Image (tube, rainbow, N blue to C red):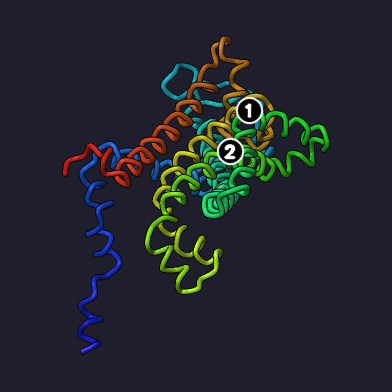
């Protein structure tokens, strides 16, 4: 009898197909197109060492005689370079693939880092209340009163002056992840706090208290589980914000080194040649950056609307 019940249980894929998220997603064309475009770009970025025609990090492959060659659809181009080359003779398509990987890695890990800080502080602040809540939220308010980019610029300028160029270059990605994460955790903390304030008044929390569960178990095993939809939505949007912040810092010369460029670094390199006719060095990486950020934001908007049925405008 038990075996028959187990065999009739729906599989994980069947449960996914029966979920509200899948139902709304399959009927939202914007979400589908955004997800497909993002998955294609993310796959290209992940597989960049395998599919890129050249390795932009290998200095032995560079030839200054190939610098500033236009894309293949423009006269005087070289068929080896689909989108042309930059000022150092690197294949722009290969550099964009590697740059997308760097930007996505920094965005994802920066959000994981800021999420760890923000979720912990938001949970403790919302659940404990009182003086603990006041102190933690005042700290968040002070940080929110400053521009995220300004905080990141100040910290990175201090860090960059404290280390020599070679040391900074080798740790640039880790430093950017830490700086961006420390600059943007208050947004997640305040969002989680507002969800916790609503959740802790519900009956299941009172039941957990009656059963003798400790505060840490209630916060991280019960309340946090019911705040995941909110965390998931804001984390998606924060990935796009982290990518834009990294691009801005790299554009200002405080991000990834020239030898390991991100999309922001490529745009920064190309700005010096924008008015000399080599527009593709800036414009093409900029288009890829815009597409990545827009698709992530559209996916985040879809998730926000689905998890808040009052806002959802899709076909029911």
SS category of the residue bearing label 2: helix
Q: In x, y percent, where is residue 117?
A: 60, 49
| Badge count | 2
SS category of the residue bearing label 1: loop
Q: Relative to 161, is 100 on the left or the right?
A: left
Q: Does 5 appear above or below 113?
A: below
Contact between labelled residues 1 and 2, with CB atoms less than 8 Å apart: no
According to the picture, the residue beneath numbered tag 1 turns out to be 146
Q: In x, y percent, where is residue 37?
A: 36, 39
Question: Given the current orientation, which residue lies at the most extreme left position?
Answer: 316
Look at the image and tell me whether residue 197 can be seen.
yes
C-alpha gap between disc 2 and disc 1 = 11 Å
Q: In the depicted view, which residue is nearer to us: 77 or 280?
A: 280
At horizontal 46% and vertical 49% (from top left) the residue drawn is 197
At horizontal 47% and vertical 68% (from top left) the residue drawn is 209
Looking at the rendering, in which quadrant would you find the C terminus? top left
Q: In x, y percent, where is residue 166?
A: 79, 39
Query: Which of the two labelled residues, at mark 2 and mark 1, occupies the earlier sequence position?
Result: 1
Q: Relative to 230, is 306 on the left or the right?
A: left
Task: Identify the mark at residue 184; answer none if there is no mark.
Answer: 2
Q: In the depicted view, which residue is nearer to us: 94 or 241?
A: 241
């Amino acid at each position: 009898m038990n075996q028959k019940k187990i065999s009739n249980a729906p599989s994980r894929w069947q449960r996914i197909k029966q979920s509200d998220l899948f139902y709304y997603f399959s009927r939202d064309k914007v979400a589908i197109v955004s997800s497909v475009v993002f998955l294609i770009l993310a796959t290209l970025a992940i597989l960049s060492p395998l599919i890129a025609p050249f390795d932009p990090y290998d200095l032995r492959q560079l030839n200054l005689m190939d610098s500033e060659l236009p894309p293949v659809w423009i006269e005087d181009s070289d068929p080896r370079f689909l989108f042309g080359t930059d000022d150092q003779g690197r294949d722009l398509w290969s550099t964009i693939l590697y740059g997308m990987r760097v930007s996505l890695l920094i965005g994802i890990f920066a959000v994981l880092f800021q999420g760890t800080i923000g979720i912990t502080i938001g949970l403790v602040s919302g659940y404990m209340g009182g003086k603990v809540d006041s102190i933690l939220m005042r700290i968040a308010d002070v940080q929110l009163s400053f521009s995220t980019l300004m905080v990141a610029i100040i910290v990175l300028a201090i860090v960059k002056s404290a280390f020599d160029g070679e040391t900074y270059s080798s740790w640039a990605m880790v430093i950017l992840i830490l700086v961006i994460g420390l600059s943007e955790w208050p947004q997640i903390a305040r969002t989680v706090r507002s969800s916790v304030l609503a959740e802790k008044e519900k009956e299941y929390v009172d039941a957990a208290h009656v059963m003798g569960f400790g505060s840490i178990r209630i916060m991280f095993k019960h309340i946090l589980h019911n705040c995941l939809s909110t965390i998931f939505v804001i984390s998606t949007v924060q990935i796009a914000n982290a990518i834009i912040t990294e691009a801005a810092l790299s554009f200002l010369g405080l991000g990834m080194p020239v030898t390991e460029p991100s999309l922001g670094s490529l745009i920064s390199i190309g700005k010096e040649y924008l008015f000399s006719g080599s527009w593709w060095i800036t414009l093409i990486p900029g288009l890829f950056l815009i597409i990545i950020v827009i698709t992530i934001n559209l996916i985040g908007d879809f998730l926000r609307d689905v998890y808040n049925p009052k806002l959802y405008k899709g076909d029911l």
